[in-house]
Image: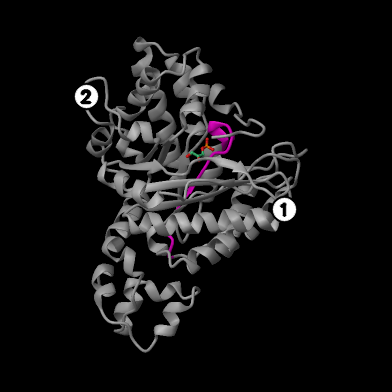
């Protein structure tokens, strides 16, 4: 039975269950259908429920993942500066045009996260970027958070801004063609993390997720646990479990429809400055352990961030996680680990565009194979093996 039709049906004697935040299972369409009763999903999001589920499923489709190019203007400026270009709107447009008009990209990429400027931008020939994406069957997404700010009363930690006016902005983004959203907040292991910072991160993500769903956007839930620090992989696991437990607690309290969200976790790795590196197999084991303990199978997709790993590392780790079936689609939503070789190849020169697009397809295909558990790093370039970790990185 369709979710939208379910919400129109009357509430039943099990109304108290609907008020219990832990009863997400009650929202499963099949479960509701087989038991022949129904509960309201969440009145305000009901009109989009079916669409949210469909959008999330299409992004989490086999062999595909997300291209994240939602760098703020300041961060995009850093990317451009690395190849000697000024941070002008024309240069940002040229770079995004290169990426978004890559022929055949849709074979490996199911969604693209854009910055607001790009969502409203067109190619130099006047074709809207959102239409370029649609032609490749790629779902346009939008970064909706307003960045990080110091969190008073914490241990030098931060919180994520952007809830004010989010409902009206999200409605506008939907009109412009966006169908999913991203909100990135961060948690720092060396800073504690404090109970206050974890609660604030989880609460903010849940508020954002509920507002996004009300406006037809599938929320990507991203509490990035930063790579910064010299801690062990066991410590990362401990913090990740704590963070995700709290995130799901508040998602449930906010009546977020789990079938209509996507997650963007960090992989569970040792801190960047830890004395020992972990193998892809170890990272996969820790990361999947954490996810199995914390993420309900109702969630359709886990789309990892790369967080400063090299292109090859991020792909190898993803491949290791797909060696046996998972309850969710386990894939990628990389920015740095998809863009590094592209930028280096492009160098801002028109004559290099074709080669740069080929470089993007090589990375996208490698990660597509990793999503299917069939990637091998044989023949990868030295450039693709270079780490991209930056201490205190801001996005
Ligand atoms: P990275 O893959 O560079 O860590 O980017 C993460 C991100 O949040 C992009 O949307």
Residue 299: within the magenta?
A: yes
Please report the residue visible at 65 percent of the width from the left and 34 percent of the height from the top.
Answer: 392
1 vs 2, front mark? 2
Q: Residues within 10 Å of mark 1 (few under 14, many from 20)?
A: few
Q: Residue 113: x and y, percent?
A: 39, 39
- Res 219 label: none
Residue 17: within the magenta?
A: no
Residue closer to the observer: 98 or 325: 98
Please report the residue visible at 24 percent of the width from the left and 39 percent of the height from the top.
Answer: 134
Q: Residue 344: x and y, percent?
A: 49, 18
> How many marks overall?
2
- SS class of the residue under badge 1? helix
Which residue was labeled with disc 2? Answer: 126
- Is 221 displayed left or right of 199 in the figure? left
Residue at disc 1, CB closer than 8 Å to ligand 1: no
| Residue 257 visible in the picture | yes
Q: Toward which corner of the image does residue 14 lie, by quadrant?
A: bottom left
Q: Residue 183: x and y, percent?
A: 48, 47
Q: Which residues are magenta?
A: 298-313
Residue closer to the observer: 114 or 117: 117
Q: Residue 74: x and y, percent?
A: 50, 27
* Residue 382 in the image: above or below residue 273: above
Which residue was labeled with disc 1? Answer: 234
Asked whether disc 1 touches disc 2, contact meaning CB atoms under 8 Å apart, the reply is no
Please report the residue visible at 32 percent of the width from the left and 55 percent of the height from the top.
Answer: 215
- Is 351 displayed left or right of 277 in the figure? left
């Amino acid at each position: 039975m369709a979710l939208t039709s379910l919400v129109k049906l009357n509430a039943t004697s099990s109304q108290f269950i609907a008020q219990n935040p832990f009863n997400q299972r009650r929202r499963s369409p099949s479960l509701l259908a087989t038991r022949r009763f129904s509960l309201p999903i969440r009145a305000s999001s009901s009109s989009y429920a079916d669409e949210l589920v469909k959008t999330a499923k299409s992004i989490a489709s086999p062999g595909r993942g997300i291209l994240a190019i939602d760098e703020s203007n300041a961060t995009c400026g850093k990317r451009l500066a690395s190849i000697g270009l000024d941070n002008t709107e024309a240069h940002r447009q040229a770079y995004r045009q290169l990426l978004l008009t890559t022929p055949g990209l849709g074979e490996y990429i199911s969604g693209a996260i854009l910055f607001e400027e790009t969502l409203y931008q067109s190619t130099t020939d006047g074709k809207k970027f959102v239409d370029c994406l649609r032609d490749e069957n790629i779902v346009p997404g939008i970064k909706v958070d307003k960045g990080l700010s110091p969190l008073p009363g914490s241990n030098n930690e931060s919180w994520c801004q952007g809830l004010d006016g989010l409902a009206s902005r999200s409605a506008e983004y939907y009109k412009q063609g966006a169908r999913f959203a991203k909100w990135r907040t961060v948690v720092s292991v060396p800073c504690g993390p404090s109970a206050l910072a974890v609660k604030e991160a989880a609460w903010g993500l849940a508020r954002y997720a509920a507002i996004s769903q009300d406006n037809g956007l599938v929320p990507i839930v991203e509490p990035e646990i930063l790579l910064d620090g010299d801690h062990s992989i066991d410590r990362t696991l401990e913090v990740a479990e704590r963070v995700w437990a709290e995130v799901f607690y508040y998602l449930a309290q906010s009546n977020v429809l789990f079938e209509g969200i996507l997650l963007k976790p960090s992989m569970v790795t040792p801190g960047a400055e830890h004395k020992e590196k972990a193998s892809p197999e170890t990272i996969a084991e820790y990361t999947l352990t954490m996810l199995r303990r914390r993420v309900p199978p109702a969630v359709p997709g886990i789309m990892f961030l790369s967080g400063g790993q090299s292109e090859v590392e991020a792909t190898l780790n993803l491949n290791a996680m797909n060696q046996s079936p998972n309850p969710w689609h386990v894939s990628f939503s990389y920015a740095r680990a998809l863009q590094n070789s592209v930028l280096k190849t492009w160098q801002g020169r028109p004559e290099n565009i074709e080669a740069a697009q080929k470089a993007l397809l090589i990375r996208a295909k490698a990660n597509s194979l990793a999503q299917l558990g069939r990637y091998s790093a044989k023949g990868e370039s030295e450039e693709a093996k270079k780490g991209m970790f930056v201490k205190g990185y801001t996005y």
